[in-house]
């Protein structure tokens, strides 16, 4: 196997995409620092066209690090070949056509499946406002119920207590009740009474009744205000929506070499997206990825440095977005070690290549070292061991670096990037680099094990996922997982990324690298984190291939329609807001129940309360019940004592000296007055104090008290 340079068809760079700065140095004088800045400019150009719309020209991706044509001879992966029928937009955000809104679905979470519904950002604003109104209305109804219960369950019969009940019953909202009951409590505290224990007891009882009612009113008011603001956010649980089955595409497993190349080209943009997101996602994703590099301190020879790197990460059904399998777990663990013993034929004085024998002669790999080859920055190849995968899923692979005699502007000491002085006979390089990497760089001998767990059982082959107990994943999605994880994702990502696999190469504008800042650990950490991102995005990528593909679609049935369950996963997008559907329904049901209960209580005032003809002149008295309070303590009923016309039984109210309708007035009443079923008796302030303790005596020396 010969690791020759890859060459891809050239592609012109449109001048409206990249405009070179006047201060930019010539290509042969650029440093890796310039390359990093240029790389960022180009990535920005990929994302936006001049009119700030998403770029839909994936062929421009081949125009990296070039002024006119691709790399001025710099290699690009041949497999990354875009055409009118096989293209995937790189760095293109998801559109609203890729997911379903206003459709109930199950959102996977760490606590299980959540019944949910998704809205667009604009619609979610209206939903939030509606939920806020519902929360506020619920507490208004709740306050009416509290006031009703306060009247029905009251055991006190004193005048002060009924003043409190009148205040509560005529308070339409808790804020008004809070202030009125505060005033009531203050008034109770300012009452002057004699020092008898009975008087103190009744007065203290009414004081605490007022304080408790005020506190309850404030709690209801505060809860209504707080939940009206934060309540909708409690029902907002994410930014995901179910995928639209009609647009899904995932390339089926290849059956021949031609399909293998086509499939590779289709999947390459997804790999580039994963690597491109590493820098931005490293802060958060790196917390879930473990990379532990341990050099052997006993070996001091730079030519034989030993480095072992252990890595691991885990993903769940929540990460994959599986609606009905949130507890599915994929645990990945692996290890790589530098292997010097596989170098079979090292490069000598005039040698144009070096050869490695992998796994004891199972495969030979030759790295060319001609002048035309060493013009380019280092690159790597990922090679699977051609052996059957054991039952424990332990897969072996090798990472071979072609770094020997590649130029560097600085000295390096890493096993892959250890340098020496370039001889005078070496071909000229850009920037007159003084160093190059030593030949005989070690191969990384690696193994990786993927274990899938669900329901207490574990399998090591994605093709056996259907054997896991209780796993509710459609067959179509199982086929996608089997195809994606048939080989280690690290190998898939590294192969698909091609020349972008090594950080040292992506920051090299002209084949010269900075060996001092390059390392195996840095390159591998980037690839491992990228593997995590690529694994997490396997199903999401199915929404980004676009329509019109001619390659076989694993998510389509034989009839050309979406396969059963193909859309049983969710995708995330900033333009989505997801709400807990069960919580929304429960909230509406609670509101309907409280409104119904409030309506029943309103009707009870008329059905169960007193209903007498005040114009009939009937003088009889009837015993009243607690239900009578619902009517007679309302403000409208209390006003009747003053404003009803002067006829019938009202003649028994011998009142004068207050202005009223038709000369009727109410100034001070005689010893007795009768009104329908209610009997009023008057006592002096002194007599009332003997009964219970009262407010300070005001008025005209007598107080009217309703007896129920």
Image (cartoon, grey):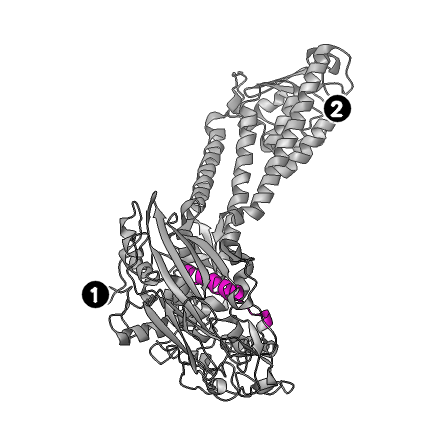
- The percent position of residue 609, horizontal first and vertical second, equals 50, 26
Residue 623 percent location from the top left of the image: 52, 16
Element assignment for label 2: helix
Q: Which residues are magenta?
A: 516-537
Residue depicted at x 59% and y 70%: 517
Q: In which quadrant of the rendered view does residue 341 lie?
A: bottom left
Q: In which quarter of the view is residue 682 placed?
A: top right
Mark 2, other Cα within 10 Å: few <14 / some 14–19 / many ≥20: some
Q: Is residue 237 left or right of residue 344?
A: right
Position of the C terminus, as image quadrant, is: top right
If you read the primary sequence from the N terminus, does the residue marked by circle 1 or circle 2 appear first?
A: 2
Q: Label 1, on which residue?
A: 558
Residue furthest front in the image: 349
> What x and y, as percent, mark residue 120?
46, 60
Q: Quadrant of the N terminus?
A: bottom left
Q: Does 212 appear above or below 32?
A: above
Q: Is residue 58 left or right of residue 422?
A: left
430, above or below 438, in the image: below
Dot 1 crowding, Cα within 10 Å, few <14, some 14–19, many 20+: few
| Residue to which mark 2 is pinned | 189
């Amino acid at each position: 196997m010969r690791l020759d340079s890859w060459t891809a068809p050239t592609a012109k760079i449109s001048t409206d995409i990249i405009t070179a700065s006047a201060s930019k140095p010539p290509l042969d004088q650029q440093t890796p620092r310039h390359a990093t800045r240029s790389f960022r400019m180009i990535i920005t150009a990929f994302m936006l066209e001049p009119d700030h719309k998403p770029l839909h020209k994936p062929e421009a991706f081949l125009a990296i690090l070039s002024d006119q044509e691709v790399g001025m001879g710099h290699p690009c992966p041949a497999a990354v070949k875009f055409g009118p029928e096989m293209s995937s937009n790189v760095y293109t955000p998801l559109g609203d056509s890729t997911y379903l809104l206003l459709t109930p679905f199950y959102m996977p979470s760490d606590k299980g499946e959540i019944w949910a519904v998704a809205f667009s950002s604009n619609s979610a604003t209206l939903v939030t406002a509606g939920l806020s109104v519902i929360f506020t209305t619920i507490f208004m109804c709740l306050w009416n119920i509290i006031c009703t219960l306060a009247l029905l369950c009251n055991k006190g019969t004193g005048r002060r207590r009924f003043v409190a009940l009148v205040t509560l019953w005529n308070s339409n909202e808790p804020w008004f009740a809070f202030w009125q009951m505060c005033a009531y409590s203050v008034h109770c505290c300012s009452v002057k009474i004699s020092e008898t224990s009975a008087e103190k007891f009744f007065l203290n009882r009414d004081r605490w009744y007022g304080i408790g009612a005020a506190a309850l009113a404030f709690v209801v008011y505060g809860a209504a205000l707080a939940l009206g603001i934060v309540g909708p956010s409690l029902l907002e649980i994410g930014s995901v929506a179910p995928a639209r089955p009609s647009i899904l595409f995932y390339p089926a497993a290849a059956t021949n070499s031609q399909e293998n190349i086509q499939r590779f080209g289709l999947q390459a943009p997804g790999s580039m997206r994963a690597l491109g997101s590493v820098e931005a996602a490293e802060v958060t994703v790196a917390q879930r990825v473990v990379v532990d590099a341990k050099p052997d301190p006993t070996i001091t020879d730079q030519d034989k440095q030993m480095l072992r790197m252990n890595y691991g990460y885990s993903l769940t059904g929540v990460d994959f977005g599986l609606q009905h399998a949130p507890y599915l777990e994929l645990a990945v663990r692996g290890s790589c070690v530098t292997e010097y013993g596989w170098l079979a034929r090292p490069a000598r004085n005039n040698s144009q290549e070096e050869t490695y024998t992998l796994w004891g002669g199972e495969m030979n790999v030759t790295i060319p070292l001609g002048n035309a080859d060493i013009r380019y920055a280092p690159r790597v190849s990922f090679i699977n061991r051609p052996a059957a995968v054991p039952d424990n899923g332990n897969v072996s692979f090798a990472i071979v670096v072609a770094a020997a005699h590649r130029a560097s502007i600085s000295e390096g000491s890493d096993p892959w990037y250890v340098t020496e002085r370039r001889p005078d006979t070496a071909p000229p390089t850009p920037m007159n680099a003084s160093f190059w990497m030593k030949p005989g760089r070690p191969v990384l001998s690696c193994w990786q094990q993927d274990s899938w767990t669900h329901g207490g059982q574990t399998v090591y082959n994605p093709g056996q996922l259907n054997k896991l107990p209780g796993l509710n994943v459609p067959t179509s999605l199982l086929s996608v997982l089997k195809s994606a994880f048939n080989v280690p994702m690290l190998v898939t990502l590294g192969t698909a990324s091609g020349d972008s696999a090594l950080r040292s190469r992506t920051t090299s504008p002209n084949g010269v690298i900075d060996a001092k800042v390059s390392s195996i650990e840095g390159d591998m950490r980037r690839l491992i984190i990228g593997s995590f991102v690529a694994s997490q995005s396997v199903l999401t990528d199915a929404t980004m291939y676009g329509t019109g593909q001619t390659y076989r679609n694993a998510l389509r049935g034989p009839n050309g329609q979406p396969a059963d369950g193909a859309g049983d996963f969710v995708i995330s997008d900033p333009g989505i807001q997801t709400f807990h559907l069960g919580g929304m329904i429960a909230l509406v049901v609670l509101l309907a129940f409280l409104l119904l209960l409030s309506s029943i209580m309103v009707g009870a005032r008329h059905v169960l309360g007193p209903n007498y003809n005040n114009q009939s002149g009937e003088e009889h008295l009837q015993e009243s019940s607690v239900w009578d309070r619902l009517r007679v303590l309302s403000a409208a009923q209390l006003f009747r004592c003053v404003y009803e016309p002067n006829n019938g039984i009202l003649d028994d109210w011998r009142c004068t000296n207050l202005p009223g309708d038709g000369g009727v007035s109410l100034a001070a009443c005689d010893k007795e007055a009768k009104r329908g079923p209610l009997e009023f008796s008057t006592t002096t302030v002194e007599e009332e104090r003997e009964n219970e303790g009262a407010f300070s005596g005001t008025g005209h020396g007598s107080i009217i008290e309703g007896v129920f």
